[in-house]
Amino acid sequence: MGILTSKVGKVKIGADELKCKSASLSITIDPGDISYIGTTWKRNLSLAKSWSLSLTFDYDSTDTAQVALRDELITGDGDIPSVSMYEDDTVYFDGAAQLGSWSHPKAAGALDIISVTLNGNGPLSYSG
């Protein structure tokens, strides 16, 4: 059976592995409405594809992948040339992304958890 567990996946920013608590890849196709007046069922034409990757991880100022993301957000243009989300050791999605958001809430008695959204910047490839 081909069911995957969260123990085998990983996320890489460039060559650096990001130690994530969770990762969610979303792939969408924008619909173009081609319905005519008077039709009872909407008809769509597939337009542009897009993807995004939402990540959460424990804050670690020594993690090179986290530092690269943070520095890109603060001093760069937000471009991430290579993001890879692995299903196992050899099968993965890969693409360039734009850093969309970075959330770093703080609470007394709690771990610092970072939430990041990366928006695809071009095609997403699948190596499998």
Image: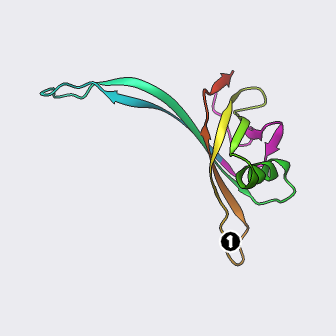
Q: Residue at x 67, y 63 (%)?
A: 104
Which quadrant holds the N terminus? top right
The residue lying furthest to the right in this view is: 62
Query: Does 65 lie within the magenta span?
Result: no
The residue lying furthest to the left in this view is: 38
x and y percentages locating residue 49 in the rendered image: 50, 28
Query: Does 6 lie within the magenta span?
Result: yes
Q: Residue at x 81, y 42 (%)?
A: 17
x and y percentages locating residue 85 in the rendered image: 70, 36
* Displayed quadrant of residue 3: top right
Name the residue carrying label 1: 106
* Displayed quadrant of residue 62: bottom right
Against 43, residue 103 (above or below) is below
In the displayed structure, does residue 75 sit left or right of residue 2? right
What residue type is disc 1 on?
Answer: Lys
Q: What stretch is highlighted in magenta?
A: 1-22
